[in-house]
Image (cartoon, rainbow, N blue to C red):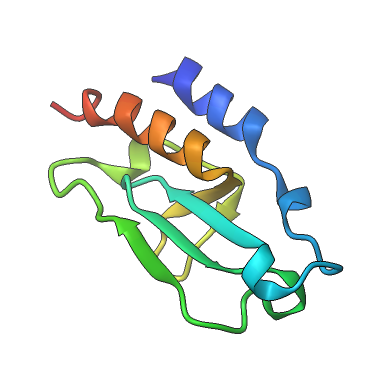
Amino acid sequence: MNELNSKIVECHNPGLIDNKKSPNENIIYHLYSDGTVTYQKGGDVYGQRSMFDLYPRFYYFDSSLLTFPLKANDGTTYAILTEEQCINFRNQMKNLGK
């Protein structure tokens, strides 16, 4: 568990938000500590537009088991990653809560 948490924290990359790109060219992905993966437009509108779910949370998973660099309003934590990293790490999280 700690090893996976460390890998995710190490890969957290706010530099993926590129204010010089148009919002549609710069899609930003978040992996949450409950398994949710979201995406939203980046560029200069990051954080100001709708966020969409790519994958829902794991209902059986205790989100307090993992702690990522950023904190969401609901108490979960999240990391900014590439889409591929989010999917890969989420797949690894899938077996932790069972």
Image location of residue 71, percent across then percent down: 54, 58
Q: Is residue 20 left or right of residue 41?
A: right
Q: Is residue 27 above or below residue 67?
A: below
Q: Residue at x 25, y 41 (%)?
A: 62
Q: Which of the pair 12/88 is nearer the observer?
A: 88
- The N terminus sits in image quarter: top left
Q: Residue at x 67, y 65 (%)?
A: 25
Choose top left, top right, bottom left or bottom right for residue 76.
Answer: bottom left
- The C terminus sits in image quarter: top left
Which residue appears farthest toward the right when viewing the image? 20
Image location of residue 73, percent across then percent down: 46, 71
Image location of residue 74, percent across then percent down: 38, 67
Q: Is residue 35 above or below residue 90?
A: below
Q: Which of the pair 11/84 is nearer the observer?
A: 84
Q: Residue at x 58, y 44 (%)?
A: 81
Q: Residue at x 49, y 16 (%)?
A: 3
Q: Is residue 66 above or below residue 75?
A: above
- Total labels drawn: 0
Q: Is residue 74 left or right of residue 81?
A: left
Image location of residue 64, percent across then percent down: 35, 43
